[in-house]
Image (cartoon, rainbow, N blue to C red):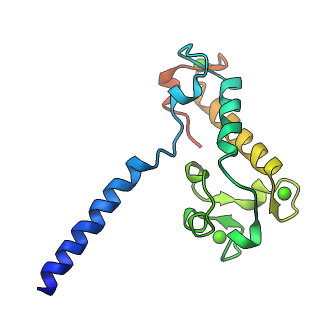
Amino acid sequence: MALLLGGLLLMAVSAQAQKAPSEKVAGPSFKAMDADKSGHLTLEEVMSYAKKKSSDTEPFRITDADLDGDGVLTPEEQRKAGINGMEQFGAVNLKEMDINGDGYISREDLDEYYRRKHREAFAKADADKNKALRPSEFALFRF
Ligand SMILES: [Ca+2]
Ligand SMILES: [Ca+2]
Ligand SMILES: [Ca+2]
């Protein structure tokens, strides 16, 4: 009986684990960024997308979020602190994010961090350096 219950529980847990990724579409999508539907992404489009994405994340105090104080905000710490919208970055180096070093991740810090990350990813993905991303280049768009 206990075994049966255990098995059922395991099934329920793994069903939940399978559901999670499809609910959370954290990664960027070409369609979402191609504002003028031209079939390619300009840096401006990527930057305005970055601005929008940044506004999903609320400013926060580093000491409230970095529970083990190692200067890195892991996805688990993000979840525990209720910080949303940074899933695509994985573990975040808070020194890099706190641009003026005051221990508070302000709206300005967030906007600048998102801009930097998206600009870097754009430059890496733009293989032919024509300042636009085709869908095939966008496949390489990673943080
Ligand atoms: Ca940490
Ligand atoms: Ca700051
Ligand atoms: Ca290109």
Q: Which quarter of the frame holds ligand 2?
A: bottom right
Q: Tally the numbered discs.
A: 0
Query: Is the residue 5 above or below the residue 27 in the image?
Result: below
Q: Residue at x 15, y 86 (%)?
A: 2
Query: Is the residue 125 above or below the residue 19 in the image?
Result: above
Which quarter of the rendering shows the N terminus?
bottom left
x and y percent of residue 12 in the render?
26, 67
Which quarter of the rendering shows the C terminus?
top right
Q: Residue at x 73, y 39 (%)?
A: 115
Image check: 79 left or right of 50? left
Query: Is the residue 18 above or below the residue 73 in the image?
Result: above
x and y percent of residue 50 in the render?
68, 37
Q: Residue at x 56, y 53 (%)?
A: 87
Q: Residue at x 75, y 57 (%)?
A: 59
**Furthest residue in direction bottom, as rendered:** 2
**Furthest residue in direction top, as rendered:** 38
Query: Which one is in front, 92 or 47?
Result: 47
Image check: 55 left or right of 101? left
Query: Which one is in front, 119 or 30?
Result: 30
x and y percent of residue 135 in the render?
49, 22
Q: Quadrant of residue 5?
A: bottom left
